[in-house]
Image (cartoon, grey):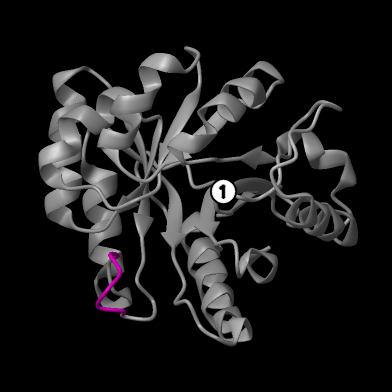
Amino acid sequence: LALLPEVTPDNALLVSNLNANVGALYRTEKKIDLDQAHMKTAMDILEEYGLVGFHDSIVQYMNYAALLTDAGELFAAGQPCFGENKVQELEAKAPVLPAGIEWHLIGHLQTNKAKQAVKMFDLIHSIDSEHLAIAVDRAAKSINKCQDVLIQVNLAKEETKSGIELENLDKLIETVDKLGNLKLCGLMMIAPNYEDVEQCRPLFGQMYELYQQLKGRDLNKADIKYLSMGMTHDYTIAI
């Protein structure tokens, strides 16, 4: 995943989800050559939108155990944030990684993993139901924590993907905002894996509109600043 400044006057943040193989982008001259082609593409997009001066804000997430050594080196070089797909995967690798990493949960979260998740993750991207939101709120309350979360939206209504469908989104937003130990920080979407990647563009555009609408709502304690979307094959369109 990459966290990039969004091209708006208020400098909100656009989160573009790059997969683990995307090039290492961080705020030092040192680079770990995971995938130079992807890294160059991402940098080209930043330059195209006049964001060269914002390179310090780029966040590269990596989520494969095979990259543990690289993750440690990236963190030492000034890369603060990493993502994981599953609670149990972080449980296995966190003990051998440096303390102080900011962890994001990207994958689907089961309610029975809520207690472990709130102990380990700074931001959960995948709240997709009232039942899950209540479970995470309860788990966060038990450790006196206010858990930052994103709501995952299933715009394409894919049966194989998690996420709240659009017609139920407003109700879930209201539920999350009322829960005392959750802070809503934005939205997340995983687009379908279309053969023609251009088919993702309307979905990304719709997600951006939903994000802007959410920013304009009068919510209780939300801090709307993240729009999380775009995988390795479609992240250039998401950006």
Q: Residues within 10 Å of mark 1 (few under 14, many from 20)?
A: many
Q: Residue furthest top?
A: 99
Residue at coordinates 34% horizontally, 51% vertically from top-left? 107
The C terminus: image quadrant: bottom right
Figure disc tally: 1
Measured as percent of width and height from the top left, residue 213 is found at 49, 65
Q: Give the residue pinned by disc 1.
A: 1
Residue at coordinates 65% horizontally, 21% vertically from top-left? 73
Residue 112 placement: quadrant: top left
Q: Amino acid at mark 1?
A: Leu
Vertical arrangement, residue 103 with respect to residue 184, above or below: above
**Is residue 121 part of the magenta span, yes or no?**
no
Report the side of 60 relative to 48 (left or right).
left
Residue at coordinates 26% horizontally, 48% vertically from top-left? 176
Report the side of 228 relative to 36 (left or right).
left
- Magenta segment main secondary structure: loop
Helix, strand or loop for disc 1 = loop
Measured as percent of width and height from the top left, residue 82 is found at 52, 34
Residue at coordinates 55% horizontally, 47% vertically from top-left? 20
Vertical arrangement, residue 149 with respect to residue 32, above or below: below
Vertical arrangement, residue 184 with respect to residue 200, above or below: above
**Is residue 161 part of the magenta span, yes or no?**
yes
Residue range highlighted in magenta: 158-163
**Observer-nearest of 166 and 175:** 166
**Observer-nearest of 8 and 233:** 233
Residue 88 placement: quadrant: top left
Report the side of 139 relative to 86 (left or right).
left
Vertical arrangement, residue 220 with respect to residue 72, above or below: below
Measured as percent of width and height from the top left, residue 156 is found at 38, 81
